[in-house]
Amino acid sequence: MAEQTQNHKPTRSYWRWSKQDFFPEESFQNLASYKTALSHTCFRLKDRLLNRSSVENEMLLFQESENAMKKCLTWWDLVWMSFGSVVGSGIFVITGQETRNDAGPAIILSYAVSGFSALLSVLCYTEFAVEIPVAGGSFSYLRVELGDFVAFIAAGNILLEAIVGAAGLARSWSSYFASMISTDTDFLLIRVSYFADGFNLLDPIAAVVLLIADGIAMSGTRRTSILNWISSVLSFMVILFIIVIGFIRGKTSNLVPFFPYGARGVFRAAAVVYWSYTGFDMVATMAEETKNPTRDIPLGLVGSMSMITVVYCLMALVLSMMQKYNEVDANAAYSVVFEKIGMTWAKYLVSICALKGMTTSMLIGGLGQARYMTQIARAHMIPPWFALVHPRTGTPINATLLMAIPGATIALFSSLDVLSSIFSFSTLLIFMLVAVALLVRRYYVKDTTAKRDLVKFLACLFVIIGSSIGIAVVWNSNTTEWVGYAVGAFLWFLGTLGMGLLPKQRVTNVWGVPLVPWLPSLSIGMNLFLIGSLGYQAFLRFFICSAVMLIYYFLVGLHATYDMARQNQQA
């Protein structure tokens, strides 16, 4: 009878809405306990600033989801997920703009520089993903090495980036689709005269497309992956066609002059085209669903980014060969150039390929960002209800809805210029913090590293970050003097060299970033340099949004994570 009772043990419904599902922590049981928690805010903040999570703790947090995600991905899936997420419409739009306005034929060098910077970040992500194969991606990496507070700042920006970025991508999809039908890209929008400017052109197509993409992501990881790699392989064939035709019909004489805007133009374009490489971090969040993370993640991430960099450089090269840089169309470069060489039909292939890129970016974005949110909810920084994994689909439906519904709402009401927000700043900041976290992981182990070595490490890290910021400041001052760059580079070299002479406290078990600390230090420098190239509005928006996030943290997130950490310690 006992065995029969055990076999028929009732399971809790996935769809439940009680207060305990959203706020189970001790601090939120009643008003008195919440007041007590608020009175201990300073003590709890100090605890969260000084204490870090552990790899074991991050691995055990999956219990908060009640059901496990399905291990169904291989290196092949990860390669094409990265391709589908990264290769969107950017390469077709930004290349023409930067070739004409900033770099000229040297745009190939801009893509090479940006690709190298992205590859450095990929190496850092790969080591962490192999060592900590959970759904949290950069959130988990920062929580383990830099602590809860830094991880929360990253988490808040990830959430903002997910919602606003998805809305902007959906709005771009709708606009591009309209341009294929009519010269008036607003003809599918609904004008509401009594709404404010920037919010008065409703875009139901953008909202519906985003909801469909997230719906597919919720239906199953394996199904989404198959759909992505089939469409991405077809897209790759179109890109290969563009490259082949470009070499056949192009002229090397169009590459002269190669540096019409000088070195400054090359780096200015590199800061812009870098956004064509973002999206690979989504793949790192799929580690929990990868069959063999130690083999598949390095192959998937490093392999795909190397392939994408080569593809981007070749596409940039053939565009400059097919048309003089000052004649390139800034808005639809590839479509126009094919029309000018008499292959009008090919411009429709380019348009379909760009539309496909935006679609797969939304698909993989829906998968990856939901995994971020799942791990953030497992840590109780947001209500753990969002960490639940559906028993049938094996996907975090609640976490996906957390982004899909607000994202679709924003896409419905907000125009593209309103959505040009701070997520570029957020992405670079997180990439930089992951590189810092990797250095911390290699050179500092609590209760093991000597205090003397810790002080030396922090001093070297301060010099690396400070010199990188200094170089960015000199660059933005538009000075032609080389002294500032030389001093900054020399200090960066000394800081990195000094760190390299310190004893490493941890050796990677399976796969690790080579040439530590040089490559992570270079990643820090390049990401800070690119952050410095952003306008002051990006800094202003970032600090305003971070201030709003901190209000939530001090009122809710701090107390929930403190209770969770204390519960884990007692267990």
Image: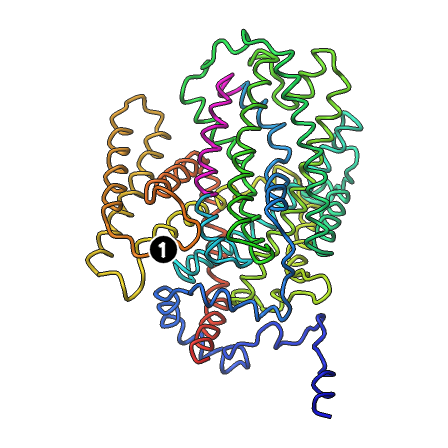
> Which residue, given by chain and number where applicable, does mark 1 sit on?
441
Residue 205, quarter of picture: top right
Span highlighted in magenta in the image:
101-122
Residue sitting at x 72%, y 83%: 7
Residue found at the far bottom of this picture: 1
* Type of the residue with mark 1: Arg
Residue 488 or residue 72, whichever sits in front: 72
Q: Quadrant of residue 3?
A: bottom right
Pinpoint residue 492: horizontal percent, then vertical percent: 28, 38
Placement of 348 over or under 502, stated as above or below: above
Identify whether 398 is placed above or below 357: below
Rendering coords of residue 512 (x, y %): 41, 48
Which percent across, then down, holds residue 560?
A: 50, 71
| Residue 471, x across and y down, in percent | 32, 34
Taking the image as shown, residue 419 lies to the left or right of residue 194, namely left
- Left or right, 40 with respect to 21, comes to left
Direction top: furthest residue: 253
The N terminus appears in which quarter of the rendering?
A: bottom right
- Pick the residue in front: 373 or 41: 373
**117 is within the stretch colored magenta:** yes
Query: What residue appears at the point 45 percent right and 22 percent down from the top-left corner?
Result: 265
* 201 w.r.t. 69: above or below: above
